[in-house]
Image (spheres, rainbow, N blue to C red):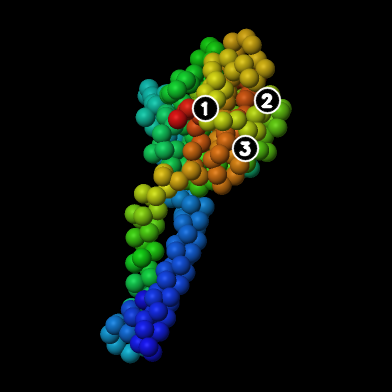
Amino acid sequence: MARARNRIAGIISVFGELLITAGLILGLFVVYSLWWTNVLADRAADKEGDQVRDHWAAPGPGALDTKDGIGFLHVPAFGDGEVLVKKGTDPKTLNNGVAGYYTEPVKSALPQDEQGNFTLAAHRDGHGAKFHNIHKLKAGDPIVFETKDTWYVYKVYETLPETTKFNVDVLQPVPKESGRTKPGRYITLTTCTPMYTSDYRYIVWGELERTEKVDAARTPPAELR
Amino acid sequence: MYGWIWRHLPGNAWVKALISVVLVLAVVYVLFQYVFPWAEPLLPFNDVTVDGQ
């Protein structure tokens, strides 16, 4: 009798310890997602960003080497810092703390193209969380893209705080849902929303306002000063 | 379970405590290095693209 009771108590205590362990592992997963992936991604992005800048500083051709990353996104509304932009939106690319331009399902235009939509995706949380503050972007805010020799200054004109992941039309060369009907030089930022989940997508549209040549000192345009 | 592990660790209490810390660190390392990176793409927290999939 006493033996059987001991056995039951033993099973219950092991079960309880397993529950505590599961709780600790879930807690660690949150730490991993929201902190550790940022550490790794920022480290990788800094290294790659330095490589791109070194590449730019070196003489010779190679203004647009899409393997390395094509330039840097500066968004004053996100706070300080810059976001390296690379080709592709597969998780492997985005997990390194960069923004990727779409190659599918709708191919992105590049900033220097005569017209089209420069479409970007980046993480909202974890992995650098480069678009974490996307909700702070309002109509009229500047988005600046820096390449080797040009600053592209875009102005936000429309945001879509919630849409489904199936809404690939937001990436069209002329994004009709943003209210524009004529071809132009647009930029589209996409990320997940609400924060910490990816039930929906958050979209921000901007339009090219002007370009500036990069000078020898790489003086940033007025929007970034 | 943990009591069983503790009883089967060698040495006095200090040695046991030290081994326990090392074991905990090893488990955290394996989780961060292998288990979480594997599990993450399977969970719906980090899909940022519109792709219709």
**Labels 2 and 3: the sequence-earlier one:** 3
Q: What numbered label is drawn on residue A134?
A: 3
Up-down relation of residue A75 to residue B14 (above or below) = above
Q: Chain of mark 1?
A: A
**Labels 2 and 1: the sequence-earlier one:** 2
Describe the element under mark 2 as helix, strand or loop.
strand
According to the picture, the residue beneath numbered tag 1 turns out to be A166
Q: Chain of mark 3?
A: A
Distance Cα–Cα, label 2 vs label 3? 12 Å
Question: To which quarter of the image does residue A176 belong?
Answer: top right
Q: Given the image, on which type of amino acid does mark 2 rest?
A: Glu
Distance Cα–Cα, label 2 vs label 1? 19 Å
**Callout 3 touching callout 1 (CB < 8 Å):** no
Up-down relation of residue A105 to residue B43 (above or below) = above
Q: Chain of mark 2?
A: A
According to the picture, the residue beneath numbered tag 2 turns out to be A158
Up-down relation of residue B31 to residue A204 (above or below) = below
Q: Given the image, on which type of amino acid does mark 3 rest?
A: Ile
- Image spot of residue B47 (x, y percent): 49, 38
Which residue lies at the image location 68% right of the left edge and 24% below the top edge? Answer: A157
Q: Given the image, on which type of amino acid does mark 1 rest?
A: Phe
Give the left or right position of residue A223, taking residue A44 as reference. Answer: right
- Residue depth check, mark 3 versus mark 1: number of the one nearer the observer: 1
